[in-house]
Amino acid sequence: MEFRNLGQLEEAASSGQQELARIGIALLFILGILIYTNLRIGDLEGGYLLVVAAMIGGYMALNIGANDVANNMGPAVGSKAITLLGALALAAIFEALGALVAGGNVVSTIKNGIINPEFIQDSTTFIWLMMAALLAGALWLNVATYLGAPVSTTHSIVGGVLGAGVAAGGFGVANWGQMGAIVASWVISPALGGVIAAGTLYFIKRSMLYEEDKLGAARRYVPVLIAIMAWAFVTYLLLKGTKNIIKLDFMTALLAGLAAAAALYFALLPLVGRAARKMENTRESVNKLFTVPLIFAAALLSFAHGANDVANAIGPLAAINDAIVNHGIVQKASIPLWVMMVGALGIAIGLLLYGPKLIKTVGNEITELDKTRAFCIALAAAITVIVASQLGLPVSSTHIAVGAVFGVGFLREYLKVNYASQLHLILDEHAGLEREKLQKFLNNFEKASVEDMKQMLKQAKKHKEDVPLTKEERKRLKHVYREELVKRASIKKIVAAWVITVPVSALLAALLYFMIRGMLLP
C-alpha cells in the first residue's frame, strides 16, 4: 500500500494497533475459558474435548455479538436517537441480562430438529459433530462480519449441524422438510418485516408528517403508536424473551400486552401533549417524540435477542458437556451456569469489540434513517416475530430487521416516484412555453424533500403560466426522481450472504467433522 504523506501512515498505524488490541482482548477471553475449564474438568474422561468445545463456544459467542446485535441497535444509531458508544453499552448490558436471566436452564441439543439423533452412532460421534457445527458457524460469522454483511446466526448454526450431521450419518439423517421451511424463511422474514415497517411509516407520513398541523396530529397519534409498540413488545417478551422463566399461551400474553399498552397510552397522553407544546410545528419535532420509545425498543430487542440467540453459542456446548458427563445423547441438555456465562460474556465482548462495523452497515449504509423510520423498523421486528411464531414459521431476527430497513427505503423511493408521476401529468399541459420560466422551479424541485414536493405540486396547479414543461425537461425531472434511496450494492451483498449462509456453514462443518474425526481416531 502506498502512503502519500505522514498523516496517512500514522492513521494506518493507529488502525492497525486498534485491530491488534481487539484481537488481543478476544484471545484473552478465549484463554480465560481455557484456564477455567482446565481447572474445572479435573480427571473427567474426555475432559480435553470439553475444554476445546468451550473455547469454540466462546469464539461463536464473540461472533454472535459482533454480527447479530447490530440488527437491534443499527436503526437507533443510524437515526441518531443514541450515540454509538451509548448503543454499545446499552446492548452489552441487555444482551447479557437476557442471556443470564431468561436464557433458560435447558436447551435443545439438535437445533430446530435439523437432524435425527437416532442416526448418530454414539456419544463420541455426536461430540465431534457438535464441535464441527459450532466451529463452522463461528467461522462463517467471522467472515460475514469482516465483509460487513449482517447474517442469521441461527441459520449459521443450522447449516453447521446439517453439514456435520450428514457427514456423520449420511443424507438420511437430515430433516429435509424442516430445511425447506428454513429456506422459505429467507423470503418470508424480510418480506414480512419490510411490509410491516413500510405500512407503519406510510401511516405516520399520512397522519402526521403530511399535515399542516404536524404537532396537533402527533399529539393524537404518537401515544397510539407507542401503545401499539408496548403491546407488541410485552407480548414478544412474554412469548420469546421470558419463555424460559414463565410459560404463557399466546392469548394470555396478548391480553397482558394489551393491558400494558392501555396503561401506557393514558400515561403518555399528557406527557406527549406537554412535550409537543414546547416544540415548533416541524417534521424534526415529530421525530423527537419517537426518541425515547426507540431507545427502549432497542434495549428490549437486545434483551429478547440475548435470551433467544445465546442458545446458538451455548446450545452445542451444553450438548457436548452433557454427552461427556453422562456418556450419552439426549434431546434436551441442562445448561450449567459456567456455560451460560461463556455465552453471555462472549456476546457482550464481541459486540463491544466488533459490533460498530455492522451497526453502521444496518444504520447508515442501506438507506438514510431518521427516528420515525427507525421506530417503524423496531416495531416491525417485534410484530413479525409474533406473527411468524403463531404461524409456525422459522424466521430470522436478522432477516426481519434488515428487511424492515429495506421496506422503509423502498417506500421512500415509491413516494418520490408517485409524486413525480402526478407532477408530470399536471405539468404536461405546459410543454412548449418558455424554458426560462421553468428553470427556477426545477432548481428548487431538485433540492426539495417529499413534503416540499407536495406543496410545489399545489403551487404548480395555481400558477400554471409560471411553470412550463418541455419534453426534454420532463426527462430531466424523471431522472431527478430516480435517485436510489436504497443502496443496490448493499442489497446484493446482504442477500448473497443470506443465500449462502446455510450451504457455506454446512460445507465447512462437513469438512471440519472429517478433520476432527481424523485427528481423534486412534
Image: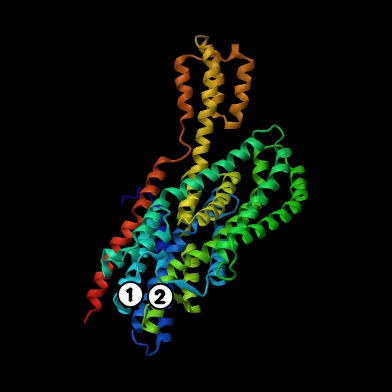
**Amino acid type, callout 1:** Phe
The answer to whether 466 is drawn above or below residue 178 in the figure is above
Residue drawn at the location 40% of the way across and 76% of the way down: 330
Residue drawn at the location 59% of the way across and 48% of the way down: 375
- Using the image, tell me which numbered label, if any, was put on residue 126: 1
The answer to whether 181 is drawn above or below residue 320 in the figure is above
Kindly indicate the quadrant of the structure image that contains residue 13.
Answer: bottom left
Secondary element at tag 2: helix
Instruction: Report the quarter where the C terminus lies.
Output: bottom left
The CA distance from mark 1 to mark 2 is 9 Å
Residue 400 at x, y = what percent? 49, 51
- What is the residue that sits farthest to the bottom in this orientation? 43
Residue 365 at x, y = what percent? 46, 46
Mark 2 neighbour density, 10 Å: few (under 14) some (14–19) many (20 or more): many
- Using the image, tell me which numbered label, if any, was put on residue 492: none
Circles 1 and 2, Cβ within 8 Å, touching? The answer is yes
Mark 2 highlights which residue?
Answer: 319
Residue drawn at the location 44% of the way across and 41% of the way down: 487
